[in-house]
Amino acid sequence: MCLAVPAKITRLEDSGQGTVDYMGSEVKANFSLVPKARLGDWVIIHAGFAISLLDEEEARETLQLFKEMADASS
Amino acid sequence: MKKVSLELGSGGRLMRDFIAGTILPSFGNPVLDELSDASHLPGGVAFTTDSYVVDPLFFPGGDIGRLAVNGTVNDLVVGGAEPKFLSLAFILEEGLDFAVLERVIRSIRAAARAAKVRIVTGDTKVVRRGQGDKIYINTAGIGRSIARPRVRKIRPGDKIILTGTLGDHSLAVMLARGDFGLSSNVRSDCAPLLFLLPLWKKGALWMRDVTRGGLATVLFELAERLRYPLLIEEDKVPLSRPILAASELLGIDPLYMACEGKAVVIAPKTKAGEFLRLIRGHRLGRKAAVIGEVQDRVGRPGELLLQTATGGLRLLEPLTSELLPRIC
Amino acid sequence: MKELRNPKAIRKLLGDIEEIARLLPRPPRIMEVCGTHTMALFRHGLTPLLADAGVEMVSGPGCPVCITPNDIHEAAIGLVSQTEGLTLATFGDMTRVPTRKGSLQTAVPGPGSRIRIVYSPEEALEEARRDPSHRVVFYGAGFETTIPAIAFTAKRAAAEGIRNFSVLPALWLIPPALKAILEAGEIAITGFVYPGHVSAIIGAQPYEFVARDYGLPGAIAGFEPGDILLAVRSVLNQAAAGKPGVANEYARALRREGNPAARALMEEVFEPFDAAWRGLGTIPASGLRFRKKFSALDAASEYALEIGGIGRDLPGCRCGDVLRGVIRPEACRLFGKKCAPDSPLGPCMVSYEGACLIHLKYGRTRRPLP
C-alpha cells in the first residue's frame, strides 16, 4: 500500500522543506515528520514526505547478512 | 454509451482491439492486414503516417517538431525502408504565439536535414481557441523498400537486441511538465534510427521502434505472431540511473515506458555478435545489448517471458492503460 | 540494495523456508497485508518460488484504492463533473476505479475543471496557493503511511488561511481491519507479513494483539525480495517454535515505537470513526475524519457530498471476498473474462496493487530456468 524509497538528504531548510538525492535524481521532500533528520541523513520517502530515518548501522548489518547468505549458498 | 477514452490512444490493448475490431473489418486489404510500421506498396515504395500530440511542446532532448520527423522516419526504418520524403500537416490552435510555431518549424527543418528526408507537401488548419492544444502535427513518410521483415524465418536461438536504454523519452516529457517534484538530467532520446538500415542487408529478421507501450508491448506483439516464446532477462536490459530512480520512486515499470530513438532487433543466431558490434559502433547505439532470445526450452508459443534478477520467471503482458505514477 | 535481490541469497532463504515449512503440522498460509508486498512478490517472481517451498501467500486488505467504497469514488466523480473551475487532485491509481458513474478517467470535468495526478499532497496545496480564485480538492486515499503527509498538508493550509483548498478523505487504519479479518474467522492463516511503511509510522505495538489474542505470529517486512523472505522465514520460525510475536525484519527503516511525531500530527488533525470498507463492511474506529477544529478543510461537507453508505459494487464483482482473503482472484467468475485490466469491474483489477490485476498481470508465472 505504500511505495517508498530510501534517499539521502541533500538540502534541508528551516521550514522543513528540502530535497533528497535518490539514485542521482533530485526529489523535493518535506522533512516535517522526522524532526531529528539532519543534512546527509538517509530517510524513507513516501508521497513527497520523509516518514522515517534510516538506521545506517542496521542497514549495514542487513547487507552483511545477505552477503553471508549468498556466500553460504554458492 | 461507449465513448472514446484517453486509454484508446495509450497504445494498450484497447487500441489493439480497436484496430482488430473496427479498422481492419472496415478497410482490410492485403497491405493493411500486415499491420507493419510501414506498408510496402507495389513499385518498391514504403509508406507510413503518424500524428504527434505532446505536452509540453518542448522538453529536454527534443520537441514536437523533432518528434514528428523522427517518429515517421523511424517507422520507415524499422519497416525495412530508407526514408526519402515527408508530408507535414499542422493543426494549430487560435491564439498560439507565432514565435512558438517558428521555433517548431526550425526544429523540423534541422531534424529533416539530419534524417536526410525532404518535406514535399503539407497543410495548415487552425481551430478555435480551446478546441485544440496549441499544435498538433501529422506527418506521412515515403521511403525506398530495402527488405521485408521476415517473422516466419525467426527460429529458437535467434537473439533479441535492444539498441539502448529504455524510458528516457517518457520520463523527460513527464518531468518537463514539472510534476512530482522530481528532477534529473534525463533527456528524450528522440533521434533518427538510420544507422540500423545496413542491418536489413545483413539479414535482420525483424525490427520495431520502442515507442508507446514500451518494450514489453512491442515484444508481446511479436511473440503473438511466432510459434515460439520469447525470453528476456531483467538484468540485461540497459537502464539509465534516472529511469531506475523514477521507476522505483513513482512505481512505473521501465519495460512499459516509451522511447523515441530505440529499437529492438531480432538477429539470426549466428549474426548477433556482428549486429551488436555494428550497432554499438554508432553514437546512438553505444549501450545496445543482447537482452534475450527466441526460446524452445521454456514457455509456450506466443508467450513473452521475463527472467527476473532474483531468479524468478514471469509472463509479460502488453500495456493495458496509460502509465500513471502511484504511491501505493 | 542489490544484495537483497541476489539470486544466491534468495535461494538460501527459500531453502531455509522449505525446511521450516516441513516441520509444521499443516502447509503454511501467510497473509501479506500490504498490496505493495503483493506487487513485489509477483514482480520478482517470488510467489511460485514460495509455493515450491511449500508456502502459500494470501493477499490482504492493504490497498487503499481497493477498499475505498464506491460511494466515495462516485462523490469525487460527481464533484469534478458538476463543478466549474475546480481541480480534483489525486494519486494515480484512484482515477481508474470503475463505478456506476464511470471512473475519474472517463469523467468529463465541468467547465474550467480538471483532474490532476500528483505524487505529493503538497503539489495540490501549491496549486491552491498559486491561484486563490481556483478551487482545489485533494482526494486523498491512504493508510497510516500516507495519512501524516495529508494531515501535515491540511494543517498547513489551515495555518496559512488558504480558503480554496480542501481534502476529500478516504483514510483507513490497518490494525482494526486485521482484527475484523481475524474476528470473521473465514480463513485459516499461519501468520502475517506486516506492512513495513505503515509500521514505520505506527510501530510494532499495534500488532501485538494478534499474537496475544489469536496466537498468530507475524513479522514486519521491507519491500526488497530478500526483506519479504526474511519475514516469511521469521513467521515460520515463530510458528514452529510455538512462540508467536511481532518480529521487526525491517529494522533499518523503522523503530519498534514507530514515528511518534507523525502519529501526533495524525491525531491532531483527524479522529477515528466507524468506517465502511469495501468487502469488510463497517469496522469500529477504522477510518479517519477531520476533527471539528479542521472541519473547514473537509471537502465532503464543503460540497455537501453524499457519503456514508457502503456503496454498491458492480454486479458479480467479488472484490470484497478477495480483499478478505476468502477467495483467490482466479476464483471470481468475472476474472480475466468480463473483468480485465482494460475493462475492470472492480477496484482489485484497477489498482496497481489490486490483487486481481497483479494475479492477472504477473500471476501466470512459470518455473525458473534450470
Image (cartoon, rainbow, N blue to C red):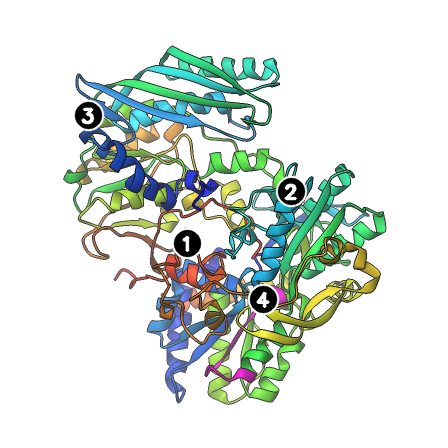
Q: Is residue C326 above or below residue A62?
A: below
Secondary structure category for the residue under label 4: helix
Report which residue position mark 4 lands on: C196
> Where on the picture, by quarter, is residue B85?
top left
Q: Mark 4 belongs to which subunit?
A: C
From which residue to which does the magenta span run?
C183-198
Mark 2 is surrounded, within 10 Å at the Cα level, by few (under 14), some (14 to 19) or many (20 or more) other residues, namely some
The numbered mark at residue B57 is: none
Question: Distance from label 4 to label 2 (Cα)?
Answer: 24 Å
Q: Is residue B33 above or below residue C193?
A: above
Residue C218 position, x and y percent, is 54, 78
Taking the spot 37% from the left edge, 74% from the top edge, the residue there is C15
Question: Distance from label 2 to label 3 (Cα)?
Answer: 46 Å
Answer yes or no: is residue C286 visible.
yes
Q: Mark 2 belongs to which subunit?
A: B
Question: Distance from label 2 to label 1 (Cα)?
Answer: 29 Å
The numbered mark at residue B147 is: 3
Can residue C193 be found in the magenta stretch?
yes
Report which residue position mark 2 lands on: B181
The residue lying furthest to the front in this view is B1
Query: Label 4 amino acid?
Result: Gly
Residue C260 position, x and y percent, is 75, 67
Query: Label 3 amino acid?
Result: Ala
Q: Mark 3 belongs to which subunit?
A: B
Query: Label 1 amino acid?
Result: Pro
Residue B313 position, x and y percent, is 33, 59
Disc 1 + disc 3, Cβ < 8 Å: no
Question: Distance from label 1 to label 3 (Cα)?
Answer: 37 Å
Query: Label 2 amino acid?
Result: Gly
Disc 4 + disc 3, Cβ < 8 Å: no
> Where on the picture, by quarter, is residue B128?
top right
Q: Is residue C299 above or below residue C174?
A: above
